[in-house]
Amino acid sequence: MTKYKWIILVFVAIWVVGIIVVYPMIKKNQRLQVFQPVDVNPQLVDIDMQRTAKAHRIADFSLTDQAGEAVTNKDFEDKIYVADFFFTTCPSICPKMTASLSELSAFYKDDKDIMFLSHSVTPIKDSVPVLAAYAEKHHINHDTWKLVTGDKKHIYELARRSYFAVTTEGDGGVKDFIHTENFILVDKGRKIRGFYDGTSAKDMERLKEDITILRYEYED
C-alpha cells in the first residue's frame, strides 16, 4: 500500500472517530430553548399573553383516548412528548402528519421516555370508536401514542393558550375550526421546547435531533 493511501486511511479513521465521539459530546452540551409566550410568533399567542415572560407550562387537561380511557397530564408525567392537532377525515395535511408521527413512533418504539399526543379538532365527529378505527388503520401503539377527543372548548383552548399551535382566533364554539401542521415538543416539566412542520421531512429530522439534545438534559 502506498504512502498516500495510508495517509487517506488515517484521515478517514480520524474523521470517523470524530463523528462517533465528538458529535454526541457537542449534542450533549447543547440546550434547547424554553419557549415563553414572549418568544413565540405573536400571531400564535393570544393578545393577553403576548408580553408574558414568566414560566409557561402546558395547562392541566382531561380528555379521552382511542381506548375510551381518561387521559390527563399524569399520563405524560416524566415524559418527553410531541403534540399535534388533527382530525380523522382531513384530506390534506393530516395524512402526512400521521405518517410523520408513525415514523417517529416506530423510531422511538423502544424508548419509554417518548410519547405522542394527537388532539382531534372535530371531537364530536371523532368519537372513541372513530379514533379506535383510525388507530387500528395506522397501527398506532396505544401505550405511547394517544389520540384524544373531548370537550371542544377545552381542546381549542389548549391549542391556542397552551401549545401556541394555531394563528386563528376563536372561542371553541360550533363555527370555530382550527387546522395546523405544527408539532410541538414538550419536555418533562410541561414546557415547550420546539415547533416543527409535521409535513416536512427536514423538520422531522430536526425534531429527532432536538429530542436527542433534550434527552441529554435528563442525564446530568
Image (tube, rainbow, N blue to C red):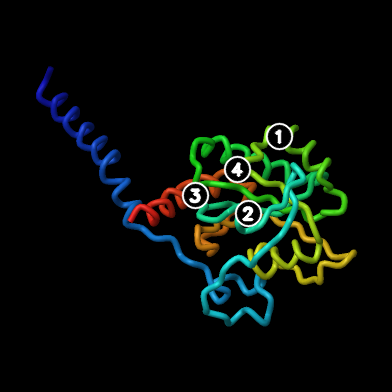
Residue located 50% across and 42% down the image:
112
210 left or right, relative to 120 = left
Mark 2, Cα crowd under 10 Å, few <14 / some 14-19 / many 20+, is many
Q: Quadrant of the C terminus?
A: bottom left
**Dot 1 corresponds to which residue?**
138
Report, in whole angstroms, how far the alpha carbon at label 4 lies from the one at label 1: 14 Å
**Which residue corresponds to mark 2?**
83
Amino acid type, residue under disc 1 in the picture: His
Instruction: Point out the tag, 3 or 2, that comes first from the N-terminus.
Output: 2
Image location of residue 43, percent across then percent down: 67, 72
Q: What residue is disc 4 on?
A: 144
Tell me how far mark 2 sits from mark 1, CA to CA: 17 Å
Examine the rendered structure and indicate whether residue 83 appears above or below residue 162: above
**C-alpha separation, residue under disc 3 versus residue under disc 1:** 23 Å
Secondary element type, mark 2 = strand
Which residue is rendered at x = 23% and y = 32% of the image? 12
In the rendered structure, which disc, 4 or 2, sits on the residue that comes first in sequence? 2
